[in-house]
Image (cartoon, helix red, strand yellow):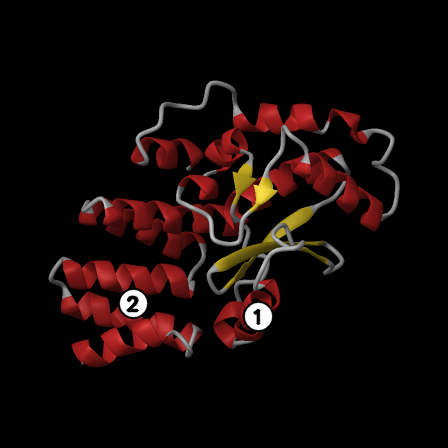
Amino acid sequence: MDSILRRDLGFPPASVPLRARLDSLGQGSRGVRDSSFERRVAAIAAILASSEGMAAVLQPSDTDLVPSLALERHRGGCTSLAFAWLVLGERFGLRLEPVLLPGHLTLRDSSGRFVEPLRGGLERTASFYDSAFQLARRPAYAALRAVPHGLEAAMAVQGGILAWKAGHLERARDALRIACLLAPRLPEAEGNLGLVFEALGEPDSARAHLAVAVAGDSLNQAARLRLEKLR
């Protein structure tokens, strides 16, 4: 998925495999691997804050959401940072899993403790996360906790949006369908797929997917308004 997103953004393939680059950053993990959860999390955060790592940005550009491009630019959004945390977490003995929230991706370990890649000195984080976690209590989001392919689903949504921006509606439709298969009833995937179907002149399919998006995120005013208009 990373290589597909690079291609859609007009970038050549990564010169070095992404996992290998992240593994090299975590070579000093041996002395910390058996320490407390908090110490291992702090060690990973320090690596990603270094000159070779990635600084978090709350409102990333398209390139900041693609893991390999984010690492090259030393700044990442939730999707790219979640991937980096997953890989480095393995080196530090942390078994992390992605958690899908409204418009956001975070991580937690097997005991339920959260790791939030984007936290730390960023403006508007409190209201942003309060909103995301509040919406995440809704049934559709509760069902998305620990989706096995949650990270891939988030990247597929990004791929669909990129294709849509470029005017490639069929490619956008296909990418968003993949996201819906990876994380069934994910409001971001369903809502965007509904809008793409509307642009393709298929109102029945558009209504069906927008209805799923609204059911999962009743505060999504854009999806609700489009659905009402189509009805």
Q: Secondary structure at mark 1?
A: helix
Q: Which residue is mark 1?
A: 127
Which residue shows up at 29% across the image and 67% down it? 209
Seen from the viewer's position, the closer of residues 112 and 117 is 117
In-image side of 109 versus 83 (left or right): right
Seen from the viewer's position, the closer of residues 220 and 98 is 220
Q: Residue 163: image x %, image y %?
A: 26, 45
Q: Secondary structure at mark 2?
A: helix
- Point out the frontmost of discs 1 and 2: 1
Against 110, residue 19 (above or below) is above
Which residue shows up at 38% across the image and 48% down it? 158
Q: Residue 127: image x %, image y %?
A: 57, 70
Which residue shows up at 24% across the image and 63% down it? 195
Q: Which residue is mark 2?
A: 209
In-image side of 60 versus 84 (left or right): left
**Residue 185 in view (yes/no):** no
